[in-house]
Amino acid sequence: MDRSAVVDGVPTTVARPGAGVCWPALVFLNGVTARGRFHPDVERLTDALARLGFLVLVPDPPGLATGEITERTLTAVNGVVRAAADRPDARDGRVGLVGVSIGVSLGLLAAEQPDLAERVTVVAGIAPYLDFSNILRLATTGHVVDQGRLVPYPRQPFMSLVFARSLVASLPPSRGRNELLSELRRLTDDEPNPLELFRHVDRSKLDPDTRAVAELLANESPPRFDALCATLPAGIRAALERLSPLKEAERLRAPVEIASAPHDKYLLAAAQTSVRLTVTSTLDHAVPTLSLSDLVGLARFDGWVVRVISAASHTSGSRE
């Protein structure tokens, strides 16, 4: 098996089955983790998929390991997906996209690209975010919009940290932006209240764009969220749209297989795509917790895995 390569400028693990010259291709997109493609679970999954006969590429796009998800991250993912489909050892010039958490979101966004839509065999994964504005609302206020109503929902501190880093990293460089980003990078993944930073910073000393972002991240009032979001720089608001798979979901041509924990269904609220959703209590957000005491949930998760492998294996189809 090959291990380390640079694919379209992105450091990438490439795992090839031992026999043959052409295989169904998969790009695996992990969630936010400092170890990225070198996380032991990611490495084990990569090797397992290769043993099943897949050509597997696992990129480390900029920002994913540190939880600074920006349009630069998406551009890098799109480039790797194109390069994977173009490889001579990728069967039929097509590729499947499999991911975890925000990695699935990036996979969905790649599959929505007009030049890639017909070249993607399947998009599959666990607990993606589909509407970044709504999840940003959750990360800051503990509420989501569900069928037009504000609904309280438990938020994870790590989610708040990732969205804070992503929003600040998307700002143009400035002294205030750079100082806030440095402070956010110093916080550990288990920081219990990462947004407290923005409630104590002297926002009057920040440039207007950075101040607007800081005021949104300091806000805990659900009714104020929309007004504060409207004051964000136009570039940031546009980026939130472009990083939300829900906005261009009609472009999807590949089958979409999503597995979700029962309490994570809010992540898929208002989806207008032909998503096949498997809800199973064997998942805790993106982490499987398999137990023989929940045979129904185990069977659902097993069925989801079988469907994903089957869809990714059948690569024949149109190519533009």
Image: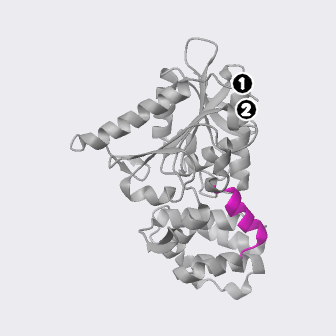
- Count of marks, rendered view: 2
- What residue type is disc 2 on? Ala
- Residue 279 shown left or right of residue 255 in the figure: left
Which disc is residue 252 wearing?
none
Judging from the image, what secondary structure is the residue with disc 1 in?
loop
Residue 194 highlighted magenta (yes or no): no
Residue 228 drawn at (x, y percent) = 65, 80
Residue 35 drawn at (x, y percent) = 54, 46
Q: In which quarter of the image is the C terminus?
A: top right
- Residue 272 shown left or right of residue 299 in the figure: right
Residue at x 66% of width, y 27% of height: 94
Give the quadrant of residue 134: bottom right
Residue 242 drawn at (x, y percent) = 70, 57
Question: For the residue carrying disc 2, how many other residues have a C-alpha within 10 Å: few (<14), some (14-19), or many (20+)?
Answer: some
Give the quadrant of residue 299: top left
Residue 23 drawn at (x, y percent) = 60, 19
Which disc is residue 87 wearing?
1
Taking depth in this image into account, of 308 and 167 the one nearest to the observer is 308
Give the quadrant of residue 239: bottom right
Residue topped by disc 2: 83
Residue at x 53% of width, y 59% of height: 270
Residue at x 63% of width, y 50% of height: 249
Q: In which quarter of the image is the N terminus?
A: top right
Looking at the image, which residue sits at the far left?
A: 293
Judging from the image, what secondary structure is the residue with disc 2 in?
helix
- Tell me whether circle 1 and circle 2 mark residues in contact (CB < 8 Å): yes
Is 295 rendered above or below residue 152?
Answer: above
Q: Magenta span covers which residues?
A: 232-244
- What residue type is disc 1 on? Arg
